[in-house]
Amino acid sequence: MLRLLHTADWHLGRRFPSFPEEAQKKLSRARMEVVGRILDAARRNRVHAVLCAGDLFDDPAPAPDFWEGLAKAFHDHPTPEAPVFLVPGNHDPLTAESVWSAGHPFRGRLPAWVHVVDRDDFVFDLSPDAVLYARPCRSKAGENDLAMALPAREPGDARLRIGCVHGSTFDLPGYQTNFPIRREAGVLRGLDYLAIGDVHSFRDVTAREPVPTVYPGTPEPLSFEDSGAGKVALVALFRHGSRPRVEEEPVAFWRWLDVRCRSMNELRGLLTTPDLERHVVRLHLDLTVSLAEESELERIVRDLEGTDATHGRAGILVVDRAKLRIEAGSVDAFPDDLPPVLQDTVARLDRIRTQAVDEAEREKANRALAHLYKLVQRGDELIGGGAK
Amino acid sequence: MKLLRLRVQNFAAIREMEIAFGPGLNVLYGPNELGKSTLAEAIRLVLLLPYTSTHYEPYVPWTGADDPFVDLTFEMEEQRIWRVQKQFGRRGSARLQESRNGQDFEDVERARRVDARLREILRWGIPEPGGMGAGKGLPSSFLATALLSTQAHVADVLEGSLHGDPTPTGKDQIAEALQAVAQDPLFLALLRAVQARRDEAYTDKGAKKTARGSVFKAAAERVNEAREEKLRLEKVVEESDAVERDLHDLAEQREGCEHDLATATENLEALRRLAAQAAARAAEEEGVRAAREEVARIQAMDQDVAAAEERVRGFAGVRSRAEQTLTDAQAAQAAAEQALTTTEETAQEALGRCDLLERAAAARAADRQVETARVAVDRQAALQAELAQLTARRDALAAERSALVVPPPASLTAFRKLATELAGARGALDVGLVMTVIPTAIIPVSVRTDGVAGSSGTIAQPLEIEANSEVEVDVANLATIRVRGGRRVAQERVQALESRWETEARPHLAAAGATDLDGLEARIAEARELEARLQSLDGDLRALQRQIADLSGAAEALEEATARSAAVRSELGETSLDALLPELDALGADPAAALRNRRQQATRDVDAARRAVQEATARATEATQKILTTLTGHASEEGRLAEIRKLREAADLPAAERALQEAVERRDAVPVPPRWVTPAEVAAAEEELERVRQTLKTLDRDLHITQGRLQQVGGAVARERLRDAIEAFDLAERHEREIETDYEAWRLLLDQMKEADAAQASNLGQALAPVIADRFQALTSRRYQSVHLTAQLGTEGVVAAGALRTPDRLSVGTREQLSTLYRLCLGEYLRTTIVLDDQLVQSDDTRMEWFRALLAEKARGFQIVVFTCRPGDYLAPEAMVRDEGEVAADSDGGLVRAIDLGRAGRPSFR
């Protein structure tokens, strides 16, 4: 039996421009850290080879931090029993300037058991009964089917033949330029397993075919849309002609949670989510709150997000307030014993709010009331601060 | 504000004086007429009056040598010292300087700008000179009145208010001062917090902060970065998409082109096959056609021979009929010529008779004209006689009318009206008179009554004379006494009317020979009758003259007719007219026309005979021509028949028919192609095939190039990144909007807090009144309960025994005291100098004592300048200037300064 760990789409060096700077760092760091967990999984499962099917870097010429980091990750890991194969994908194609080129310092720093697929006719005998064929992407776009470019099985060849390329298995008609892969390529080339990469969620695109063609997905999710991400594929091949067994193994640190709160109760409930500190949370506040609720809402958000002094409950938090509406409603929420000048201020803002002719003006007055409400609640603290 | 130094030159009675003020209470004293109020005025003028204003004139010294000059140094806040110098007058000047240490001054403004800047510094509610609300003369405002009072207007502050200020700066200054002391600690804490949040985002002037580090800048930078990245990636994706589209299009085109190539190749092969079949079939078809033409040619010869024979036979018949026609035509020609000769002879005879009858008709007409002319001559003579008769009658009537002189009939009405008026007027005089002439001696008298001469003679006894309207007594050689009835006016009217009668009517009566108006009317009627008859005669005369004119020339006509008759008769010769008359009468009413018809008929007969001859001649000529033509054609046709017979005999019809049969058999052996294809069609198909091959080659080249381009583009990678970039951009934009809204809310909150605060403080009277009232109660031993001020600081009055008492109902002394308290309060809140010019002259010792203590206390907080002639009211005896040669003396730790103005004329105090 031949055991493989199939992974792809590490996207080392990926930027996360939608996130705050600190969160970007966390997410970027996590992508490098998952490599260690992948190698651990390979060791734990005693695989015969680790196939990395493209897009390991987000760019063909990543910043040194990333290729040095990856080289270090390999070096830091105890020498494995299995070789690792790195295939250039469409994000990091094999070009003269790329990190994969023979002259790049990255190549010099790789351990001997890490192999870069830098030839179109790459062949590696995994064992006397198993052979790996792989082919790199040489550009970011291409219309040639790299899987179909692999050599076909010769008559009489009874070895396990494994293919490894990067590209998209398209179901759509028409002309494709993202290295299209025919569904039946594995069968047509006489392979026993076709390891591919590109799609970020775990997916076996040939569940009914005798030859599995599998996307393991990205080991560390890249977005809230990558619902099936965070895994590697463990493949067990028994003999030629027998469909291999493919299993998913989770390796991700972060779980991405896209949550929409339409009530205060839902928001309060978010705080009870287990392992919230390992979650990247995108919180859509889609509700209308009173002054008192707004104050509580901001407390909860602060609790989730953290402050300069405290860690947030959530690992990473992004708040979308586009649909958050403050409806000051009755200004009775303010204490009765406010000084007349503050009572007058509240009355003035309330008048602006109720008489506003456009939503923006009303929203502004509502917010001003909310600010005032929160300040009044902190009145003693503020007076004390002022006295100091 | 705090006054530091004042220097005055040539200002009213002051030649030169310089004063240094202390920080607290300054008591400037001296005897009356020393110029204390003048100094107070100098302070007012240098601060308020533009140097160009003529309002300075009362302060020009009596000597008039130099214009007034004032130099004032004052401090507005710590290390903010101002110095204003004004030389008033036409050649005046102004200068404003600023200093931090009170020693080194720098010019800030000059000339007219000085006052604008001063008013900005003071904030007393006085507008910029020449600006909106600026008046003429010395400007005034509530604060100017309150802070710089004059002795003459001690209580003015109680009569004014902020309401009359031209600008709100005074009110704003007081409101700020009151606010600062009245704010709630919570409010202040919140205000500070809100202000801090607002200041994070906006400048002092309310503009968004855009400097590095500002919240808006950071958000905007993030948006810009995200936008730039998005645009960059959009471009990359666009390029990528374009290449992919090109590749897709080229692939499709190539597929289509390959299909076209297959089609073109197949088409060419089919055409070539069909073209070969068509060529073979066409060759055999040509053989058949030639054989068929030979058979037809021989068969056509037989038909030609038969036709020629038929034509020869036809010519013989035609020739026989033409000869008979010629014979008939020649006979008809001879008959027509004979008929012409006969007709010509008959016509000649008829024309001669016509000539004779025409001459007879002319003679008869001439005779009739002679007769008519003769009748006209006779008629003319008769009319001439009648004309002479009528002319004589007209002349007689005209003479008769000329003898009558009458006015126009219309004037008669006017005369009658005049007569009526005259009669009326005379009636008014007809009052009846009785005159008595009483002689004293025998006197001759002559009497006229009513214009009519009456008795005359001598009288010795009284004579009584009676008349209707007038009595005239002529006493011989002595006098004529005329008495007339009626008033003078009536008499004058009668005279006027009589005068008019004499000038207007009387001459017409005389001319017409009438005695009265009825007679005149009869004369006018007679004159009009004569005029009517004259007009009738004139009409008859004109008719006769026209008749005579119509007959003029009758004699000449008679002569001409007689001569013409004689001439015509001579043309008749020997033939008697009478013999011809019966025939002439038979011609009817118009013999000339009848004779004309007779001549025309004769001519027509001859013409008809001539035409008949011409027609007969033409028919004979035509028949001759036809015979000649027929003969020629017959001969020609016979020659052609002989020739055709010769050719036919040389041809072999059976042999030609056999050759045709053989050609048809050969042709039918070759198959008919399904479509007839030309070589041109084949050539076109060859060209099309070549064109498609070239297109395919070009497409292959383009495809190769585009595949190369594809390797350079971003493809799915770029699209993925663009998705991220769009999301980041949207997020950044949302974030920016969020920040803007949030900070706008902070700003709105701050504005509303300030407005609420200002509104709370805007009722200045409410804030100030209790303080004044407290002091006033203390001063008056609670005699007055409270002071009422309006929101604009107008003084409504004070409450005593539960009733409001207006300031004008207070005693002079109480008014002085109340106004002084009011000023002190304002000075205290504004922390500014107040000038009191002998304010408390009406106060008793007790109250002065109270005030002295109050002034000493308040002088710790702000500067008070008092001008007085009674320094003892304000200063303890030991505080007076005592040392010889000193102008001022400070006490109470420097907070009280006594200044002896009597000694201040020296160059300096120290």
Image: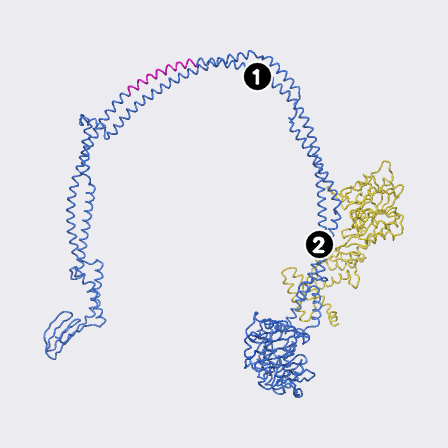
How many numbered dots are placed on residues in this image? 2
Give the yellow chain's letter: A
Q: Is residue A29 magenta?
A: no
Q: Position of residue B83 (x, y in %)?
A: 64, 75
Q: Earlier in the sequence, mark 1 or mark 2?
A: 2
The image quarter containing residue A171 is top right
Distance CA(mark 1)–CA(mark 2): 96 Å
Q: Is residue B172 above or below residue A175?
A: below
Query: Does B43 sit above or below residue A215?
Result: below
Is residue B264 toward the left or the right of residue B623 in the image?
right
Q: For this rendering, which residue is in front, A55 or B786?
A: A55
Give, as a single range, the part of the protein colored magenta: B318-343
The colour one sees for chain B in the rendered image is blue
Tell me: B391 left or right of B46. left
Q: Amino acid at mark 2?
A: Arg
Q: Which residue is mark 2?
A: B227
Q: Give the residue displayed 12% in from the left and 73% down from the top.
A: B446
